[in-house]
Amino acid sequence: MTAQLDIIIMAAGKGTRMKSRTPKVLQRLAGRPLLQHVVSQAQSLAPRRVVVVTGHGAEQVEAACAAFQLPMATSLDMQFVRQEPQLGTGHAVQQAVPKLQDDDGVVVVLSGDVPLTLAQTVADLVEASGGDKLALLSVRVPDPTGYGRIVRDANGVVQRIVEHKDASDAQRAINEIYSGIMAAPARHLKQWLARLDNNNAQKEYYLTDVVAMAVADGVPVIGHCIDDPLQVEGVNSPMQLAALERAHQLRQAAKLMEQGVRLADPARFDLRDDARGVLAQLNCSTDVDIDVGCIFTGAVEIGEGARIGAYCHISNVKIAAGAVIHPFTHIDGEKAGVSVGEGALIGPFARLRPGAQLGREVHIGNFVEVKNSTLADGAKANHLAYLGDATVGERVNYGAGSITANYDGVNKHRTVIEADVHIGSNCVLVAPVTIGAGGTVGGGSTVTKNALPGALTVARGKQVSIADWKRPSKK
């Protein structure tokens, strides 16, 4: 693309059918607001500027844009204009004209609720425009109800777009629809926008009316028709959003399977941005096996031959080769990240929190939680345990029901468990405390002082039995 590129994103609509207080363009697809998908596409085209037209929930939409995590580090000149009241698509683009100070470029108009258009598709549309033609992105669909129809002459040349409510029966039979995306020379677009009127059934200013103006002015109109309706699918209701989510996820699943990932059921797979906005990224080595119902968020790396059991939630983690994540495990590294070593066994029903760093052949069993802790090779915590702010040595066996008491109500403290230690069941290690190498802590102990290497440490009340004791009875 040699012409300077300016992009207008229409994001003013209320989205009444969404039945939500959240503006439609901030509804989420794959964990990311619809508008963020569109802004990301725009950024990848290296535009001179991006103008977002807001209206309903304008302050909320504009604040969300400022917080978007975008895939590229390059800066983006993003500006805002408001459409108040909303008087149609042409009226929306008219609001952006004052921001288009130059007449030397191509203006691309995108919709903030059409999230899955590929950047290459938009680039091809700009190429079709060539800087001197009006290019429309269109697609043929089985049911064109509700969409503007592309009307061509006998030679296939685009003449105009007719909105569904204004179309005749013959025009409604046309199955080539306008996507809402166009590329136009800035100098022509500004003139056409100034000539728009609202003489139509809706009494709105239609952007599509510029097509007939282009024909009248002798400006060639190109209908760039693609065969992928998903790229131009918009969202107007929760049902449409859910359908688009599944279609998008199925495509992501297909890409992974093309790379050799084994998915037990691609229809039950999800890859999303995480709650903090970290962009979804799942990188898998060869022979990775993923069972049904798994949700991956943020940045995840999975090593060769690793297996992910059913219904796991896995976020911001590096899982090494040969590791097995058993069903219903929850891993979320957030900012600090989580790492799982080669051949480790995790779960079922385990939870790994930020800062969990697990070595080779580590075992973390059912209902075990690990947070901000390092477990060296071969360490095991197999049942009903908590390890927080701990450094655990090689081959440690950490008993069922044991915890590190790491928080004193104000500060966090660290527990050190050196190599080859055995921690009995139902122990409390009150940090800061160190259990020396090779030591043993008897079951039920509350340890508040450092334990010597190789020693047996027992810290519990003496057992007392009272003979012939009578239980209290109800009065």
Image (spheres, grey):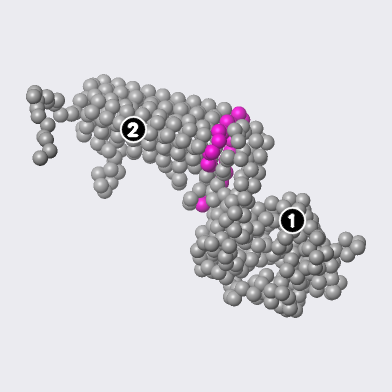
Asked whether, in this view, residue 268 is left or right of residue 132, the answer is left
User: What residue appears at the point 51 percent right and 59 percent down from the top-left corner?
Assistant: 67
Farthest-out residue, front: 475
Q: Looking at the picture, how far across and down is residue 315, in whole percent?
A: 49, 42
Residue 285 in magenta stretch: yes
Q: Amino acid at mark 1?
A: Asp
Kindly identify the amino acid type of the residue bearing the numbered disc 2: Ala
Query: What segment carries the magenta color?
Result: 277-296
N-term mark: 2 or 1: 1
Q: Nearer the viewer, residue 251 or 69?
A: 251
Instruction: Please tell me which residue lies in front, 473 or 283.
Output: 473
Q: Is residue 394 magenta?
A: no
Residue 234 lies in what quarter of the image? bottom right
Quarter the C terminus occupies? top left
Cα distance between the residues tagged 2 and 1: 57 Å
Q: Residues within 10 Å of mark 1 (few under 14, many from 20)?
A: few
The answer to which of 102 and 272 lies nearer the viewer is 272
In front: mark 2 or mark 1? 1
Which residue has dot 1 on it?
A: 143
User: Mark 2 sits on what residue?
Assistant: 385
- Determine the secondary structure under disc 1: loop
Provide residue 122's location: percent of width, then percent of height.
72, 57
In the displayed structure, would residue 369 be above or below residue 36? above
Label 2 packing within 10 angstroms: few (<14), some (14-19), many (20+): many
Residue sitting farthest toward the right? 155
> Could you tell me which secondary element the residue under label 2 belongs to?
strand
Q: Which x, y percent locates residue 417?
A: 31, 29
Tell me which residue sits at (62%, 50%) in the image. 243
Which residue is located at x 81 percent, y 60 percent? 174
